[in-house]
Image (cartoon, rainbow, N blue to C red):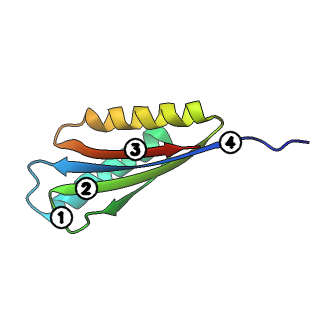
């Protein structure tokens, strides 16, 4: 009997923040964004870098789905969701799935 097939994907996004005046404000923005992403897309997501910068936010996410096409579609939707938010801009984006 053949086991269930699955696809795995992950990505890292570097965001430029606008109008943030303190690390405390950045933490509040980050917490809200990560919670929204978790709820909407059912992915694991963390702040993965630039922790001491109030102008840059780096987040990484990982997900598992039935097919690679589904992983790619979820990743694309996640990026579009972030692009729709005001107050920051995606500077770099790296994604991989297999």
Q: CA distance from mark 1 to mark 4?
A: 36 Å
Q: CA distance from mark 2 to mark 1?
A: 7 Å
Could you say which is closer to the camera, residue 7 or residue 77? 7
Res 6 label = 4
Pointer 1 and pointer 3: residues touching (CB < 8 Å)? no
SS at mark 2 in the image: strand
Q: Name the secondary structure under disc 4.
A: loop
Mark 1 and mark 3 lie on one chain; the one further toward the N terminus is 3
Left or right of 59: which side holds 45?
Answer: right
Residue picked out by circle 3: 37
Screen quadrant of the N terminus: top right
- Quarter of image, res 66: top right
* Distance from Cα at disc 1 to Cα at disc 3: 21 Å
* Viewer-proximal residue among 29 and 9: 9
Q: Which mark is residue 86?
A: none
Q: CA distance from mark 3 to mark 2?
A: 14 Å
Q: What label sits on residue 53 in the rendered view?
A: 1
* Mark with earlier residue (3, 2): 3
Chain-order first, disc 3 or disc 4: 4
Residue 82: which quarter of the image?
A: top left
How far is the residue under mark 4 from the one under mark 2? 30 Å
From the viewer's perspective, tell me whether residue 67 is left or right of residue 48.
right
Q: Quadrant of residue 77?
A: top left
Q: Which mark is residue 57?
A: 2
For label 3, the crowd category at 10 Å Cα-Cα, with few meaning under 14, some 14 to 19 and many 20 or more, is some
Q: Position of residue 13 (x, y in %)?
A: 33, 48
Tag 2 near tag 1, CB within 8 Å = yes
Q: Position of residue 49 (x, y in %)?
A: 31, 63
Task: Give the residue at x 40% y 37%.
Answer: 78
Q: Residue at x 77, y 42 (%)?
A: 4
């Amino acid at each position: 009997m053949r086991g269930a097939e699955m696809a795995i994907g992950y990505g890292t996004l570097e965001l430029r923040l606008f109008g943030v005046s303190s690390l405390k404000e950045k933490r509040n923005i980050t917490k809200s964004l990560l919670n929204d992403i978790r709820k909407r897309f059912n992915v694991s997501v963390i702040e993965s870098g630039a922790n001491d910068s109030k102008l840059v936010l780096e987040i990484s996410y990982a997900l598992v789905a039935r097919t690679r096409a589904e992983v790619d579609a979820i990743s694309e939707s996640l990026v579009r969701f972030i692009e729709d938010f005001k107050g920051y801009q995606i500077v770099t984006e790296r994604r991989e799935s297999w």
